[in-house]
Image: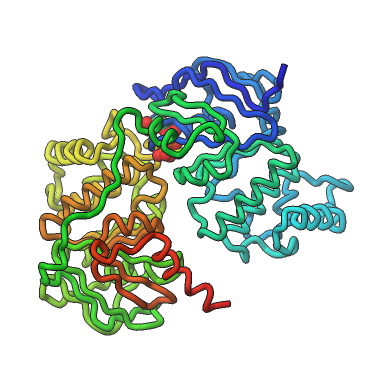
Amino acid sequence: MQTYAVETDSISINFGAVQALKDVEFKLKAGEIRGLVGKNGAGKSTLVKVLNGIHHQKAGSLRIFGNEITKATPPEVRRQFLSMIYQEFSLIPEMTVIENVFLNVEPMKGPLVDDKTTYGLVKNFFDSMEVDIEPHEKVKNLNTSDMQFVEISKAVLQNKRILLMDEPTAALEADQTDKLFRLIRKLKDRGISIVLITHHLHHIMQLCDSVTVLRDGQVVLDEQTENIDLQDVIYHMLGDKGFSERRRKFKAIESKKPLLVMQDVRSKNSRYPISLELYSGEVLGLAGLKGSGRTEILNTLFGIDPALSGSITLNGREVILTNPNEAYSSGLSLIPENRHTQGLSLMHSVYFNTILPILDRLGQTFVDDRQGKSLTNHFVERLNIRTDDILASVSNLSGGNQQKVVIAKSLANEPKVMLMDDPTYGVDIHAKSEIMNIIDEFTSQGNGVILVSSDLKELLQNCDRILIVKEQRIVQEIRDVLATDVTEEELENLIQQQREEER
Ligand SMILES: Nc1ncnc2c1ncn2[C@@H]1O[C@H](COP(=O)(O)OP(=O)(O)OP(=O)(O)O)[C@@H](O)[C@H]1O
Ligand SMILES: [Mg+2]
């Protein structure tokens, strides 16, 4: 009989009325890479949290390398075998790579870690993985991708045999993602078993031996990847509600009425003056690599990094935006890049987060609770936010549903212009199309959207115009996305050229 790395029988767990997992059978073989996919709120994170012992199942059983794990099992037993690779790393920035890898382990020679041995271990491991990181480097000097490698190395060098990765590529650039995948393949060759959660389904098809699809907390597909294709996975994720490829139909630029104009705007953080126009009814895309200056343009418009020279005109009137409050009251709103640190107050409820920006409109001293609640319910319904209680903390919502709360919060202020910084990051295809429908409705009322996205297909499908941003400059304009019929590959090339020039 085969011993699985992980094996569950009929695991169920609920949070209040939400049945997050129902009778889940999940098997992971030794040395297998298994993709775990599903829409936002399907139960993916919950399942790996049960494996990791953060949550305990209400029913069903769990074995790790044949060891029965119950609530009474000491945490060390799991920790001996498995490690979760979080997006927020557990590394200590001030310490070196070696110190981090062997933190709390002290493998050799008593309390003083023998530097030569540990250096050798880490260096050898990095070499065998073809990772180019200096073991004596302080972690704070590494980029995100290298920090992630250190995190993974730490797990492997501490002999963990199962790695759980919940959206590990979310913070990575395309070439860093390729590097991570090469590493994952090498880990597999060493016999390590991996669970990979990601919304990038083509990654699953490329990398995984097998895939589990969850829908509403239940396993709806469990197959070897070679036996299925991408369409099968999508079909099972969505259930009967299929989805169709969309293209934006509204051609806003014909309106010729600039809603927002930036003219030679410079800020503290800008290297070149920025000029752009956004028309009434338009979705204007900003395409560029992370760090190309896309976010900086939005930050200037939102008063986070205020303009020091040049002018910003909204609806024909010049506006001075020296802080986000002024931007807000002028009719701008921002969906920030990082919803956890900038977009939401996680401890607070859906209700509180939604009405937060408009508290003064609901009454200066006494908040009109009824009006606030009906507004919140309106958005929960309209944006299809999956929650059974608007007074429950936002931290309980799945990633995609949290993002919808950020959008609700933004819409509650009735802005004229929405600045959206990668709004569908970590969001499943169904919620993505819902967010795009919201954008359509919003712009059809004469409003405008500036959309930053790392998903080029999304830009091509949803923008009237796209500006290419490179090294803090707008270097090119694709005037009519619909008519020019630019492909994803061509757009990728335009964006990537910067790196070629740098070499
Ligand atoms: N601690 C919690 N308290 C209450 N409800 C929770 C908690 N954790 C998860 N849930 C609920 O359980 C369901 C599954 O959530 P989970 O985070 O596992 O989804 P997911 O598949 O990881 O989604 P995403 O792709 O958005 O990250 C959701 O409805 C979520 O709101
Ligand atoms: Mg999740």
Quadrant containing the N terminus in the rendered view:
top right
Which residue is at the front of the view, 271 or 228? 228
The percent coordinates of residue 188 (x first, y second) are 69, 41
Quadrant field for ligand 1: top left
Picture colour scheme: rainbow
- Is residue 280 something that shows in the picture? yes
User: Which sits in the foreground, 106 or 266?
Assistant: 266
Residue 240 percent location from the top left of the image:
31, 28
Residue 287: quadrant of the picture: bottom left
* Residue at screen point 82% across, 52% down: 121
Tally of numbered discs: 0
In which quadrant of the rendered image does the C terminus lie? bottom right
Is 318 situated left or right of 498 in this image?
left
- Please say whether residue 416 is visible from this viewpoint: no
Q: Is residue 178 left or right of residue 44?
A: right
Q: Observer-nearest residue: 499 or 435? A: 499
Q: Residue at x 61, y 56 (%)?
A: 179
What is the quadrant of residue 64 in the picture? top right
Residue 484 picture location, percent across and down: 27, 66
Residue 220 placed where, x, y %? 44, 25
Q: Quadrant of residue 304?
A: bottom left
Q: Residue furthest right?
A: 109
The structure residue drawn at horizontal position 68% and vertical position 63%, both measured from the top left corner, is 138
Q: Is residue 51 above or below residue 437?
A: above
